[in-house]
Amino acid sequence: MTDQPDVVRTDKRFEIRVGDEVAFAEYRLKDDSVIFPHTVVPEAFAGQGVGKRLVEAGLAFAREQKLWVRPHCPFFHAYISKRPELHDMVHPDERASLSKA
C-alpha cells in the first residue's frame, strides 16, 4: 500500500506535494461561490488519481462552506459533468454548460 500525500488548502489553491512536484487546483471566493479557474497536475503524478483528489477536496470545501461551485477549469467541469449527483452544487447560472460537456 502506498501512502497518499495529503491535500492541503492554502488561501488560493488546493495542493498535493511530493518532493519538488506540486499538483494544484486554484480557487477564488466570490460572493456565494467558489470559482475553480485552473488545475495543474504534473506528468509525474499521471494516473495516480491526483486530479480527482484535488477536485474532491475542492468540492468538499464548497459543501462545508455552503458555496456554489463555478467549475471554470476544464478538468473540474468534466469531472462534475460526468456525475449528475454533483450538478446541484454548480451555480444555477452555470448548470446549462454541464450538459454541453
Image: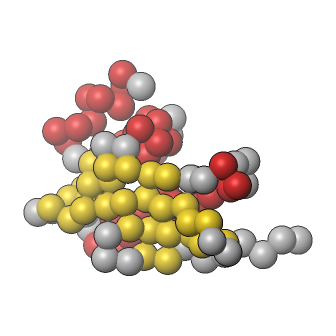
Residue located at (42% from left, 76% from top): 9
- Residue 53: x %, y % from top left: 58, 60
| Residue 13 placement, left or right of 19 | left
Q: Would residue 58 be visible to someone looking at this image?
A: yes
Percent x, y of residue 88: 33, 47
Q: Quadrant of the N terminus?
A: bottom right
Give whichever of 62, 54 is nearer the camera. 54
Q: How is the image coloured?
A: secondary structure
Image quarter of the C terminus: top left
State whether residue 80 appears in this view: no
In screen coordinates, is 16 left or right of 24? right
Task: Say which of 17 and 49 sits in front.
Answer: 17
Instruction: Give the residue drawn at x 49%, y 77%.
Output: 8
Q: Residue at x 41, y 38 (%)?
A: 74
In this view, 80 is above or below 98 = below
Q: Residue 51: horizontal and vertical position, in percent?
A: 57, 53
Count of labels in the image? 0
Q: Can you say whether 52 is above or below 79 in the image?
A: below
Task: Determine the residue positioned at 56% across, 66% down.
Answer: 22
* Percent position of residue 20, x then y: 63, 71
State the residue in front, 52 or 81.
Answer: 52
